[in-house]
Image (cartoon, rainbow, N blue to C red):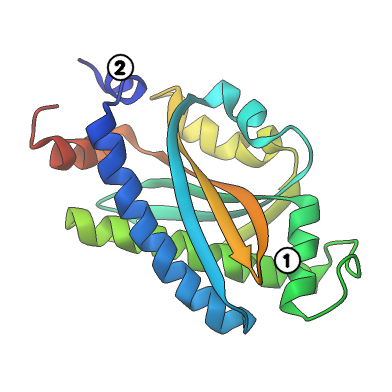
Amino acid sequence: MDYEEYIKNMDEFTKSALLETFNIGASRAADALSEMLGHPVTIEVPQLEITSLKNLPEKVGEDVKVAVYVGLGNEFSGHAFFIMDFDDATRLFDLMMMQEPGTTTEIDEMVQSAIMEMGNILISAYANALSEFLGLTIEQTPPEIAIDFLPAILDFALADIGQYCDYTMLLGTVIKVEGIEFNEHFFILPKPEDMVKVLEKLTGGML
């Protein structure tokens, strides 16, 4: 079975192992964000879905998004994105600043900086959990932020990865701050040869 076929038909055991790993990262990210925000934060990853790249905008939403991007390298290379709805980003910033909901309506440099830091914490926690679980060194680039429609945000990553594989892992990410729930998305576009290492680890070399 080739790589794309395996990703597309990933079995439930492998999905569960990956989901558990990402939830460990989410728990660590929640602790870090609780300190940053000064409010209790919980983060859960209730589902992992294998989806085609062309269906990502439909799955994540076709309106304007706020995306935090981190490049991954060394023994696991690829592109990691944390995607928020525009309105959720402004609502979360109001919570962070202890402002009345609706105070922030635009995403200026201060809002961008805060959301980028939050996204970086989340992506780093996911990457570190994956690194520890797999025994792989995963280096991370400084975060970047983009505000645009999803196809434009993903353009450069798809040009890099899309030539190898048409599928990716999409993680629903539920963030709760002070009882307010934000339903966002995280996904990773790995280089196929490095994702094979992950799958072989999870399947005991049966790939």
Residue 127 can be seen, yes or no: no
Quarter of the image where one finds residue 137: bottom left
Indicate the position of residue 83 as horizontal and vertical percent values.
62, 49
Residue 11 can be seen, yes or no: yes
What kind of residue is marked 2?
A: Glu
Residue at mark 1 to residue at mark 2: CA–CA distance: 39 Å
Q: How many marks?
A: 2
Q: Which residue is identified by label 2?
A: 5
Indicate the position of residue 52 as horizontal and vertical percent values.
49, 23
Disc 1 is placed on an element classified as: helix
Q: Which residue is identified by label 1?
A: 92
What kind of residue is marked 1?
A: Leu
Q: Which mark is residue 103?
A: none
Disc 2 is placed on an element classified as: helix
Say left or right for 7 vs 35.
left
**Residue visible at 90% across and 62% down in the picture:** 105
User: Nearest the camera: 119 or 183?
Assistant: 183
**Residue visible at 60% across and 71% down in the picture:** 117
Name the N-terminal-most of marks 1 and 2.
2
Q: Nearer the viewer, mark 1 or mark 2?
A: 1
Decide: is 78 above or below 60: below
Indicate the position of residue 129 as horizontal and vertical percent values.
31, 61
Residue found farthest to the front: 179
**Residue visible at 79% across and 63% down in the picture:** 91
Mark 1 surroundings within 10 Å by alpha-carbon count, few (fewer than 14), some (14 through 19), many (20 or more): many
**Residue visible at 56% across and 71% down in the picture:** 41
Where does the N terminus fall, quadrant-wise?
Answer: top left
